[in-house]
Amino acid sequence: MTRVATMGELTASLAHEINQPLTANLSNAQAAQRLLAAGDGHIEEIRDILADIAADDQRAGEVIRRMRNLLRKGESKPAELDVNEVVDEVAGLVGGEMILQNVTLGLDLSANLHRVHGDRVQLQQVLLNLLMNALDAMKDTPGGSRKVVVRTTVVGPRSVEVSVQDAGGGVPSERAEEIFEPFVTTKPHGMGLGLAICRSIIQAHGGRIGSRKNADRGVTFWFTLPTMDEAKS
Amino acid sequence: VSAGRGTVYVVDDEPSVRKSLARLLRAAGHDVEVFASAQEFLDRPESKEIACLVLDIQMPERSGLELQEALAGAETTLPIVFITGHADVPTSVRAMKAGAMDFLSKPFDEKDLLSAIERSLEKVRGGVEERTAEREAKKRLATLTPREHEVLMHVLAGELNKQIAAALGASEKTIKVHRGRVMQKMQVKSVADLVRLCEKAGIQLA
């Protein structure tokens, strides 16, 4: 249910992501046709154009591959995962939505993470949910201040943390715990299921989820996951 | 499609779109300058006289619509062709109301883009010609003596030499000489041409 709703919100974003390479490919192809019609060589430039067309085509295919993965039905398939890779893939999906909503997305990914054992798609859904919440929370934030930062950090010897920091209106501190309960929502049209599902996914992975107030404005939602190996520190 | 010389500014945050559009527009005979953001465009060192703007709507920091607003205050208008990966009706209405030349959804065909650019450059050329004509007319007008200027105003009012002579207390022959000089300095052969030129120079005719 949440998955489908989120995909609905993402459609515009995905159209944007796929339209970019499509636009570049059409213009590149038509430029090449003009160069060929003009005669006198241009072989080097036409070669560059073809290379760019191939690269953009692969990029469009990649967007579709990620979307398929996210929508894939079926049972949980835990595997060894690089958390940063999960973050990158989700960031690639929401990039267009961020631009549409005039939000800057920052990634601050630790290079020292150990791998975790988990379900890639489920973890992507958790992160996607937190990012969409962050966007919703910043609807009333002035244009220049709309910023989301996704961070990955090593916390303790056997755990990594993924956090999503927004610059929105915040969550009243007395509700910080209960928003993870089913059917509790701060949104006018929310179902109150997103964070509840996130919590159940993270708990099933042996992790924890929570939120903390930022020093300046907004909230940071975080979750931790146990790593497969002990970190050297 | 024939393309005249003119500079096309392309502002899009997407590198592959910028690069491909620059190639296409150059292949179609235009000069092209590309910018990755609204700010980069505003910071460009010099403005070309014959130019138009191909502008992406959705960009981080400052959107295409915000750039359009920022440019609206400038003295010479730069025609804008909007391109967007996500066209919604309110946005396109807003852009067109604010004077956009066209609004194209990505991906668009070259013929739509090139014709919008051609119309934009044509509009700028028309404006430039008009301003040049105005400057020239004013320049000629400035060479008239005060007396010739006086005679001119009466001529523009449709008066005959005899009427002007009476009004200015001069002989008809003198007025004829003044009128001849006015026609010579304004470089026109008929009163009809004189009226048109004076209108261009901004003289209010009664």
Image (cartoon, coloured by chain):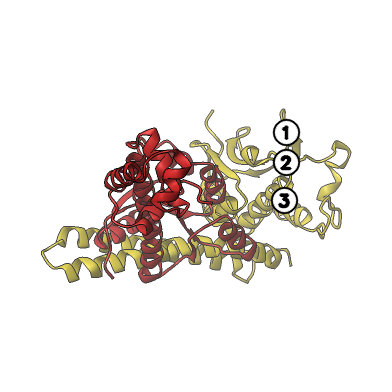
Chain colours: A yellow, B red
The reply to whether residue B127 is visible in this rendering is: no
Seen in the picture, residue B48 relative to B193 is either above or below; the reply is above
Q: Which residue is mark 3?
A: A136
Left or right of B188, for residue B102: right
Q: Where on the picture, by quarter, is residue B140?
A: top left
Q: Residue at x 63, y 32 (%)?
A: A156
* Tag shown at residue B167: none
* Residue type at tag 1: Arg
| Residue matched to label 2 | A168
| Earlier residue among tags 3 and 2 | 3
Q: Residues within 10 Å of mark 1 (few under 14, many from 20)?
A: some
- CB contact under 8 Å: marks 2 and 1: yes
Compared to A100, does A41 lie above or below? below
In front here: B179 or A199?
B179
Q: Secondary structure at mark 3?
A: helix
Identify the subunit bearing mark 3: A
Image coords of residue B150 (percent x, y): 43, 39
Query: Which residue is denoted by mark 1 in the rendering?
Result: A217
Which residue shows up at 71% across the image and 29% down it? A216
Label 2 environment density (alpha carbons within 10 Å; few <14, some 14–19, many ≥20): many
